[in-house]
Amino acid sequence: MAVNFRRQKAMGDEISTASMSDIAFLLLIFFLVSTIFNQEQGLPMTLPGQASETAKIPQKNILNIEVRANNLVFLDDLRFAIPHIESEVRRRKVANPKLIIQLKIHPEAFYGTMVNVLDELHLADAKKISIKGMDVVR
């Protein structure tokens, strides 16, 4: 009597990848739906409406800040470094609670310089800010 020893076929040693794309897609949807994005608050600004009037403001209540083409910052024609703007604006606000800041930006100045000045005004808790482009004489 002869014994026939045949090898049995091994069970599949491959992992089926047919449903991998379905699982990846479901995980993607899950993370997109469950993720919470923080929104930057920024600097709140109140813009005038169409019916706004032009008001006469005494010059003593206006602080002129200029960002010139060479990115130098001037407060009432005195040159200031950006990190010192906050303390100067706070000092002037204490001296004059009706202070309004008029920020003039030269069109060739860097955008980042304007943002840095606005950040300093925000730190100084300045609420009354007027932003204006500077007139360029060519």
Image (cartoon, grey):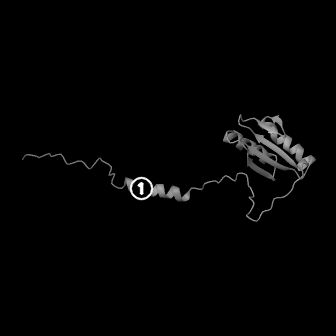
Q: Quadrant of the C terminus?
A: top right
Q: Tell me which residue sits at (24%, 47%) in the image.
A: 10
**Camera-side residue: 135 or 77?**
135
**Camera-side residue: 5 or 58?**
58
Q: Label 1: few (<14), some or many (≥20) within 10 Å? A: few
Describe residue 15's horizontal placement relative to residue 97 as left or right: left
Which element carries disc 1, helix, strand or loop? Answer: helix
Instruction: Tell me the kind of residue under disc 1.
Output: Ile
On the image, the x and y values in percent for residue 73 come to 77, 37
Single out the residue that lies furthest toward the bottom. 51
Q: Tell me which residue sits at (79%, 51%) in the image.
A: 129
- How many numbered tags mark residues here? 1
On the image, the x and y values in percent for residue 25 come to 43, 56
Q: Tell me which residue sits at (20%, 48%) in the image.
A: 9
Q: In which quadrant of the rendered view does residue 18 lie? A: bottom left
Describe residue 75's horizontal placement relative to residue 70 as left or right: right
**Camera-side residue: 93 or 56?**
56
**Camera-side residue: 130 or 95?**
130
Q: In which quadrant of the rendered view does residue 37 lie? A: bottom right
On the image, the x and y values in percent for residue 61 come to 89, 50
Single out the residue that lies furthest toward the left. 1
Q: Which residue is mark 1?
A: 23
Q: Tell me which residue sits at (53%, 59%) in the image.
A: 33
On the image, the x and y values in percent for residue 127 come to 81, 53
Single out the residue that lies furthest toward the front. 138
